[in-house]
Image (cartoon, rainbow, N blue to C red):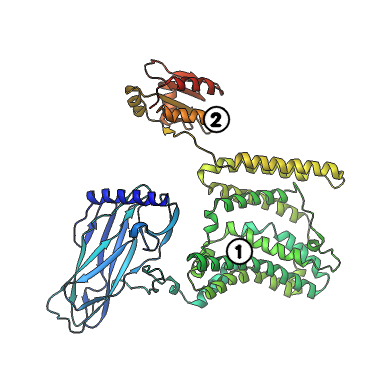
Amino acid sequence: MREKAVVIWWLVLIFAAISFAAPAGSIIKSDVVTISVEKQHEVVEPGSKSALAIHFEPKEDWHFYASAATAPGGMNLRLKPSAEKDYINFSEPIFPKPHLYFDKVLGKKLEVFSDKFTVFLPFSVSPLVPGDSPIGVRIDIEGAVCSDVQCRMPDFGQLSANLKFGAAMSEAKFAVPEAVEPGMAGGPVFLDERLSYPMWFALGLAFLAGLSLNIMPCVWPVLPLVVLRLVEQAKKGKGKTMAMGFAFCLGILLFFAVLAGANIVLQVLYGTALQWGDQFRNPAFVAGMAFLLVVLALFMFDVFTITLPASVTGKSGSGEGYAGTIGMGFLAAILSTPCSFGILAAAFAWAQGQPLLPATIAIMFIGVGMGVPYLVLTSIPGLVEKLPKPGRWMELFKQGVGFILLAIAAWMITVYPQKGRTGLLYFAVVLAFCVWMWGGWVSYNTKPVRKWLVRIIAVGLAVVGGWGLLRPAKVLIDWQSYDGSVIESALSTDRPVLIKFTADWCLSCKAVEKLVYSREDIASLIEEKNVLAIKADTTARDYPATEALKNVYNEPGVPVSMFFAPGEAEPVRWRDKSFGGELKALLEKLASK
């Protein structure tokens, strides 16, 4: 399979190379990328150093492969500068830091450059260079420029620049950043982004980022429990209160230790770094956080209660309850992730570009910043005594936080991939119902048999609901968007046409999809008989399919499906939800393609 994919790549590239070329000069322009050269100094002093900046501006959704170690067929971006005279000595090009891109053809992630980026070409000038005439420089550019659907291996030609020399160096137009050495695989030299700001500033930023996590709405569900525990432990003495504060901070630090460990594993084993925000690129994490927030919101509304073990409530024999306090600290750190400010992303971005030891220290400093307020609070008994006493205000606060958590859960659902967003939303409702069953259908005095029966049913409903709503939908039919001209063209060539009029808000349309168009036998017949399958979306009033439904086909509403058979003047129409047998019979009568 891999060899087949590589062959396809090369065929596409050979075809594209024949039809794509760019002229030489100081600017290269094509339909997918613009490349230009800029001199750091207009006048360069003999015996000094300068650089050229090569600016790339690919169009949206186009990219260059970054590393020869990962680029298919050695198609990575390469720059080869040369000068007319031997007085100019070029160093290795300095590339920007690449990012990961999932290549659908090869089925794996590769390093690429995209958007606007710059490659620097440092050079040194001999002290013996004559100053009477400029020296021409040429830059050869090689490599494929690709999109999601095609790649081109163009003949870019050559970029050119003339270097002038004089006794006085002209003002620099840009600074050349530091670089790191190429890797063992012989990759390019990248910008050294680790030197963007000093260590002391980065650690201060990390500490401030952790401090800011304590005001995040996502952490608020834990705060009432923390306040109650601190007030309760304050009655047992300063030592007990401080011990609980340290335990809570330890839970926070454990979470950031997990993140630091993940960063080490990714750098050592996979050559990449953990970035703050990567978790939101994982649909499973987004879905899990949305569901967790929904459940916590229901807890805030007292839909159910959590019966904590003795270690958590502090009623164990030792009266300490350290395990529960550590767990609450860990949970508080987890809950902070959906609501983190940009300052946290900045701190994490610095950390992930560092060697392992500084990166680990910086990540742990975020946890230190989050935990310090609790250490201060528990170290000064007078502060604990000034905490508001539990009362009605705490119940109102909890319920208000519940609405905030629901709003954050709704936002989490909006960032979930569009394809599965609807199922995620429906399952959130099913999950809320099951949690209500778990906590609201039983009480403390309910008989154990009935209590377990209700809760087993609630868990079963949640499992069945998840299996039905969260499974990736299998699309069996290659539906085309509604276009009247495409339909007319197909009918004029006696090609059979199937139109499915539907709408996102139509529940009956969903039933038609399940009962008819999810059948594998019908889908295979549509493919075998070369039927043009059209999805006519009428969700909004101004959609073309909505106007056609009323003005062209004279139908009052959806769902309705129409089948145009060759040689028939009028289509067969179905307005009910179960017509799979009739459609299959019509398809079987058609000639195969």
**Image quadrant of residue 430?**
top right
> Number of marks in the image?
2
Side (left or right) of 290 relative to 56: right
200 lies above or below 539: below
Q: Is residue 296 rendered to the left or right of residue 488?
A: right
- Label 2 sits on what residue type? Cys
Callout 1 secondary element: helix
What residue is rendered at 77% in x and 46% in y?
Answer: 439
Relative to 582, say whether 85 is above or below: below
Which one is earlier in the sequence, the residue at label 1 or at label 2? 1
Q: Is residue 517 visible?
A: no
Task: Give 368 or 24, whichever is nearer the viewer.
Answer: 24
Residue depicted at x 84% and y 64%: 316
- Disc 1 marks a residue whose amino acid type is Leu
**In the drawing, does residue 402 fall left or right of residue 262?**
right
Q: Is residue 503 above or below residue 550?
A: below
Q: In the picture shown, does residue 69 fall above or below 1? A: below
According to the picture, the residue beneath numbered tag 1 turns out to be 213
Q: Residues within 10 Å of mark 2 (few under 14, many from 20)?
A: some
- The secondary element bearing badge 2 is classed as loop
Tag 2 residue: 506
The residue shown at (53%, 23%) is 580
Percent from the top left, x then y, of residue 387? 74, 66
Q: Position of residue 122 (x, y in %)?
A: 29, 74
Q: Quadrant of residue 593?
A: top left
